[in-house]
Amino acid sequence: MTLVLELPPELERNLSARAEELQLPLAEYPVRVLAWAGAPRPKVGSGAELLAYWKAHGLVGTKPQIADAAEHARALRHDAERRTA
C-alpha cells in the first residue's frame, strides 16, 4: 500500500533525524513506528520474556545512545524503586 502524507517541516526534520540516529532509511522508520503503534502489547512475566519480545520485533539495538544496557537497566530499576507516585 502506498500512502502519501504531507508533514509539517518540523515533523519531517524530527523523523529524518531519528531515522539517521537508528541508521535506517527515512522511508523505513515511519513504517516501523506505525507497525509498533498498531502491534498488540505483550503480556510478559519476566525480563527474559520482554527481551525475547524485543528481539522478535527488531527492537534490540535501536537506542544507540544507551552504551551500556545493563547499567541503564539498573538505573531504571533504581529510579522505579524510589518513585513515590
Image (tube, rainbow, N blue to C red):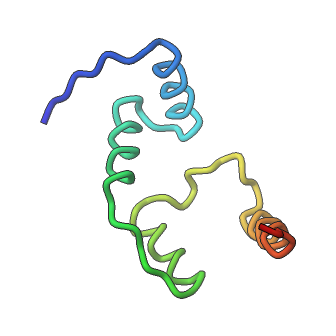
Image coordinates of residue 4 in percent, x first then y, are: 22, 22
Q: Please identify the residue farthest to the top as the structure is shown.
A: 9
Residue 77 falls left or right of residue 7: right
| Image quadrant where residue 3 sits | top left
Q: Which residue shows up at 46% across the image and 68% down it?
A: 55
Image coordinates of residue 34 in percent, x first then y, are: 34, 45
Q: Which residue shows up at 47% across the image and 12% down it?
A: 9
| Image quadrant where residue 6 sits | top left
Q: In this view, does 20 lie above or below 78?
A: above
Residue 28 falls left or right of residue 54: left
Q: Which residue shows up at 54% across the image and 31% down it?
A: 20
> Observer-nearest residue: 82 or 68?
82
| Image quadrant where residue 58 sits | bottom left
Q: Which residue shows up at 75% across the image and 54% down it?
A: 67
Image coordinates of residue 60 in percent, x first then y, are: 54, 61
Q: Please identify the residue farthest to the front as the structure is shown.
A: 85
> Observer-nearest residue: 50 or 70?
50
Quadrant including the C terminus = bottom right
Count every numbered label the image shows and give the total.
Answer: 0
Residue 74 falls left or right of residue 20: right
Image coordinates of residue 81 in percent, x first then y, are: 82, 76
Quadrant including the N terminus = top left
Q: Is residue 9 above or below residue 19?
A: above
Residue 55 falls left or right of residue 35: right
Q: In this view, does 27 lie above or below 69?
A: above
Q: Please identify the residue farthest to the left as the structure is shown.
A: 1
> Observer-nearest residue: 13 or 70?
13
